[in-house]
Amino acid sequence: MKAVRVIAHPDGGRIEVQEIARPTVGPGQVLVRARASGLNRGEITQARDRRAGDPMTVGVEFAGEVAEVGSEVTAWREGDRVMGHGRACQAQFVLADPLAIMPVPSTVSWIEAASFPNAFITAHDAVITNGQLQPGESILVNGASGGVAWAALQIAALWPARPVMAMSRSAEKLARLAQFGVDVGIDSSSQSQVEQVMSATGKRGVDVVIDQVGAPVFEANVQSMAVGGRYVNIARLGGRNAQLDLEQLWLKRLKLIGVTFRTRSEQQRIQCVQACARDMLPFLKDGRIRWAIDRSFALDDIHAAHAYMMESRHFGKIVLTID
């Protein structure tokens, strides 16, 4: 079968599409014939950092049909439409834990389904599990045009949060975000974040911040927060070193939280998948999830897909199609 592999090298890993053996199904596993796989920036940075070790298939999300089930699996059957979160997902066949896959409604395409797992599981873990967003509270999402931000904004709007605020350097992208439940768009290239947040919240401040930018917005994020606010960091696209005014942390009784799958156990990862499925699948089934697919690439065009993602001009998800 075809698979996207990272080949370790002392100067940084390189990506290749290779022919490898189809996985063998264990008693408690499911084999899925993948039709699409979402692309994520973390896969690219991890590949570049791989300087030693055996070749490894990349990818953390997929959508396709169940091809085979292990002898101990009763929840899934061959032919079921599924999407899931896991490892080695950018391949024609993906071996999955039956607890880490979710049903795909017939109204949802493979490309749409493949864009759901990582973005929504990550965003749900940040917004609901760690951010502890409550209905009626306010939320701000920094760097609000990528896949996880698109999911976080929808989760917040559906919960529902009020107001839902998004920040970006692109006025065009902010205008497009209105369809995903954004009440207030903040153009960081021309507007003061703190002033806009305080105006939108009646000078109270924002309850939950979902940050993907890091250092450049850290101070303004803290200044924008309400008493008892929760600051959740997902990524540090603008830099990782920032200064914290401990007086602000103390007076506002803030919680600073980092989220990642890299330091979670397999059981913890499954718990994240299940929590997202519990809360978000009803919205998927009734059609209230709105899709933001920027572009799709064939699996063989993985280098072009990576180059396009690293330009950071995309809006929403980039997806690989798998023949």
Image (cartoon, grey):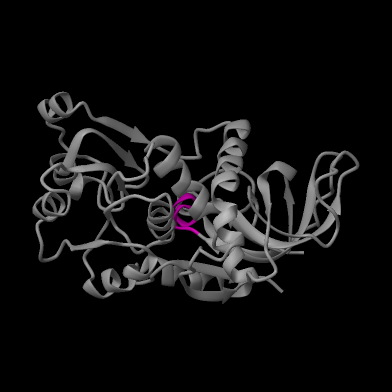
Q: Residue pushed farthest top?
A: 250
Q: Is residue 306 above or below residue 265?
A: below
Residue 7 shows in the view? no
Q: Residue pushed farthest right?
A: 71
Residue placed most toward the observer, 310 or 136 = 136
Question: What segment carries the magenta color?
Answer: 40-46
Helix, strand or loop for the magenta stretch, by majority: helix
* Residue at the spot 21% in from the left edge and 26% down from the top edge: 253
Which quadrant of the rendered structure holds the C terminus? bottom right
Residue placed most toward the observer, 55 or 141 = 141
* Residue at the spot 34% in from the left edge and 67% down from the top edge: 312
**Snapshot quadrant of residue 103:** bottom right
User: Is residue 45 rendered magenta in the image?
Assistant: yes
User: Is residue 273 rendered magenta in the image?
Assistant: no
Residue 71 shows in the view? yes
Q: Is residue 111 above or below residue 246?
A: below
